[in-house]
Amino acid sequence: MKTNPSQNPDQAGSALMITMIMTAVALAILASAMVWSASNTKQTHRSIQYTESVAAAEGATEKILTRISTDFISGGEKKVKSNLDTYRTNVPAASDSAYWSQWEFNDAAGHTGRTYVQGATTTNFTILSSPYTGLRAFISAYTVVAHARELTAMQPVVGGVLQEIDIVSVPIFQFGLFSSDYMETCCAEPYSQRGRVHANGKIYAGPDSVLTFLGDVTATSDILFDRHPLDPRGNPGGSVVYKAGKTFPVPAMNLPIGTNNTPLAIREIIQPPPSGEDPNSLVGQLRYYNQAQMILTVSNSGISATSGLFNNFATAIPSNELAVIVTTNKSFTDFRESKTVRPIEIDIAAFKAWSGSTSNSLRIALGSNDVSSIYVLDRRTLPGTSLSAVRLINGTNLPANGLTVATARPLYVLGHYNQPTPAFLGTTNTSTTLPASLVSDAITILSKNWNDAYTSSSTRNAAINTVNAAILTGDVPTTAAAFSGGMENFMRFLEDWSPSSAIGYNYNGSLVKMFPSQYATNRWGTGVYSAPKRDYTYDINFDNPTKLPPLTPKLQWVARGRWATVAENQNSTTP
């Protein structure tokens, strides 16, 4: 019988050792894997927690940005600045949602329940980027930073977010054409529009000829090759060329009047204030009446004038001085309105001489500066066949600091206005003009050939005319009965300009349509005048803030700026 030899003891010990080593290695690998897995789980959880903390911090900044936007609309930038400390404590709370009860916010300076909110000084004129590339604006930048930590989290992970918000202020006269609502441009002859064009609504570009926009065109709604739905005329038969492009929709640009920018609400800026209104209210601050240096009042009992609100109307203008400047005994027929106009006529040449006189009491009250703004208040009661209005004559040369004339009534300009250099009449050269604006219910241009005795269209022959001023006024909106005339007919005429004879009307400025006319309300149409050869140009002087007309309103809106995450205990993206 055979038997197997017994196992060598050395071999058995080696096998056991190898088994133990392999087991130890396996256990080490397993332990390492478990440590790695735990670490990876921890890192993953931390990453998720950080993402949630950043989202919570962003929620805190959004709450503040919403409050800033709301306060700006209701109270302007003044209200925003006064509420900075309120914003700092305006963090999300359980009263907003139960979710926020598990979060803590801090301002990176050791203060919980607070965020970092800081306003910067308004910048100088800044060139904007898209969608308003090229516009120049004053910008007030506000920085909001929030840090958030979840109280119930396994790890105290803090997320921080920085958001910037800009309050943008753009002088309204930086546009060749601006409309507070829809805009119509429907020329029957070839027409080129220089300067930027914007509408807080739709733009209806529906010409019967070639309409060329040489500057940027923007609208808060559509830009259409079409006519207004109520326009009773047929479809457009021309074409439109956008040399610099068109962009829509874009954010609205509004006046900070403390309410919605409806045309009727905007009209308040040209009206005298109602009794009891606070002049420091948003609309009160924008009223031309409250801003003007001189208030000229005409009533049935006579003419009077004082300084403006700046010194509480304390300086009275002597009647003998007013008699040289203002008359009310003229009349003429406005064939569009079918009424006799009874104008308050202001002789600008006489006004300029008076304004520059060292004995002028108003000039003294202004610190020996020329008067640069007049508000004309017409309190006369006239029969229904008459139209109260203001007319400016002899306006070739303006006072040294320029001039803004504002009234709630229709305004007529007779002859050349604000072109002191004869060689530049009929040109786009405004190098010697002064800052000027004309603000009214409606505006009508009368050439130097105008005669108040005109009784029929056959004798009303115009002469070449130049007006250099920004114009803010009203129109008669399109209805199913009649077309408004469009922006090409925004300025009104009463004469035969005979375009075939090349009698032209040269205008350099900015045309701003803000509200419906309330006094000069008859519709545009044929038979009242023959159109001039139009040469309408945006005045590039208005790109310079020192050359803007006195009392230029500013459009404002809130724009979002930079967004970034920030490190714990930091309120900027750089250490």
Image (cartoon, rainbow, N blue to C red):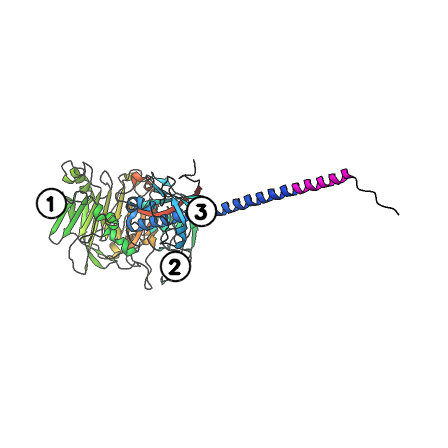
- Is residue 190 something that shows in the picture? no
Which numbered disc flags the more N-terminal residue, 3 or 2?
A: 3
Q: Earlier in the sequence, mark 3 or mark 1?
A: 3
- Give the secondary structure at mark 2: loop
Residue located farthest toward the right when viewing the structure as drawn: 1
Where does the image place residue 95, in percent across and percent down from the top left?
35, 54
Q: Which mark is residue 102?
A: none
Residue range highlighted in magenta = 1-25
Q: Which residue is mark 2?
A: 227
Which residue is nearer to you in this view: 506 or 486? 486
Q: Nearer the viewer, mark 3 or mark 1?
A: 3
Does residue 155 appear in this view? yes
On screen, residue 368 versus residue 152, left or right, reads left
The residue closer to the viewer here, 243 or 377, is 377
Where does label 1 land, which residue?
Answer: 319
Q: Amino acid at mark 2?
A: Arg
Alpha-carbon neighbours of circle 3 within 10 Å: few (<14), some, or many (≥20)? Answer: many
Residue 449 screen position, x and y as percent: 24, 49
Magenta-drawn stretch, dominant element (helix, strand or loop) = helix
Report the Cα–Cα distance between label 1 and label 2.
52 Å
Q: Which residue is mark 3?
A: 53
